Image (cartoon, rainbow, N blue to C red):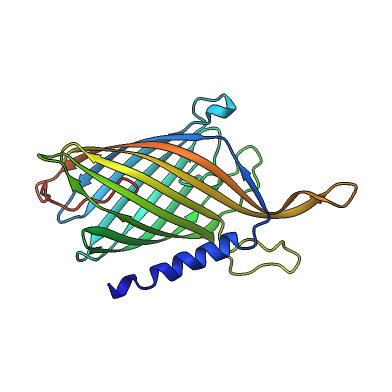
Amino acid sequence: MRYLSWVPLAIGGVLVATGATAQRRNVGDLVIVPEAQVEVALKGADYLLAGFNLVSNPGEGSTFTGGQLRLGYEHFWNEHWSGGATLRILGGSNYSYGDFLGLEGNVTPGLLVRHSGTIGGFNFRQRLGLEYATTFDVLGSSNENRALTRLRLDVDRVFPLGGKLAIRPRIAYEVVTYLRLQRDENELKERVVDFGNLRAEVGVRLSPHVDFTPWVASQTYYLNTLPQFDATGKQTGGGRTNLLTPLVGLDLRVTVFTKAATAERVQLPTQH
């Protein structure tokens, strides 16, 4: 249990950094994100992953405005520690519809390390990732390539319902921060945390080969832009702003077993 002692401090620090001095809050329209995944089960709990999702904004009258291909590999050194590599590729009419709305990057490779533990039947995990988002010059876009870090904390519990059927309620919170090694004197100071995502889900395992996960989430894009004022000097826009977006999604996963894998392997949630 000692390894979890830093979790409440980390959560508290994130909440203070992202919400204590926020001045403005805007809530956007609902976004729908369906995803299909194929997971190749390797020896132990190792896996190869290929996933593809689409982003729909019904409030804007569009069907699908973006899509993301996700590739990944993760190796488990023991029951508590694992690490791997990821690759995200974005396409469509909007190049900022990845895991986080507003996060640009057409091609984003990354590395991750994960710690897992169990207390009283509950699974606790901490995932730390490092990525580099590369944005191509599309239609004169001025978006820059940027390195970023990602920290996710989550907890879940598996409830067998008889036979091969089981459900896994889960809640997760993740923050993303751009790496800023140097800032010009006249450059506007950015927020400590750039993106946040609170997600709740219920995974349903129909068999070792098929499971699906409906989920809801609230994403926040933390901005700091030049303030705007009216004729009386009252601020009407800009400044420290939190852009909130509600999301609804459904992940469908098919697991393919190799000769080295077993049906009793420990499998991660679909959010990986």
Q: Is residue 169 visible?
A: yes
On the rendered structure, is 231 left or right of 43?
right
What is the tally of numbered marks visible in this picture? 0
Using residue 266 as the reference point, say whether residue 189 is left or right of it. right
Check the image and report above or below for 44 versus 104.
below
Quadrant of the rendered image containing residue 35: top left
Q: Looking at the image, can residue 179 be seen?
A: no
The relative height of residue 36 versus residue 270 in the rendered view (above or below) is above
Q: Where is residue 81 shown, x and y percent of the image?
A: 26, 66
Up/down of 173 relative to 119, above or below: above
Q: Nearer the viewer, residue 145 or 112?
A: 112
Q: Position of residue 255 (x, y in %)?
A: 20, 41
The x and y percentages for residue 104 are 55, 47
Q: Is residue 13 left or right of residue 222?
A: left
Residue 1 found in image quarter: bottom left
Q: Quadrant of residue 10?
A: bottom left
Residue at the extreme right of the image, as rendered: 231
Decide: is 250 above or below 5: above
| Picture residue at 35% right of the left edge, 62% below the top | 126
Q: Nearer the viewer, residue 73 or 249?
A: 249
- Residue at the bottom extreme of this rendering: 2
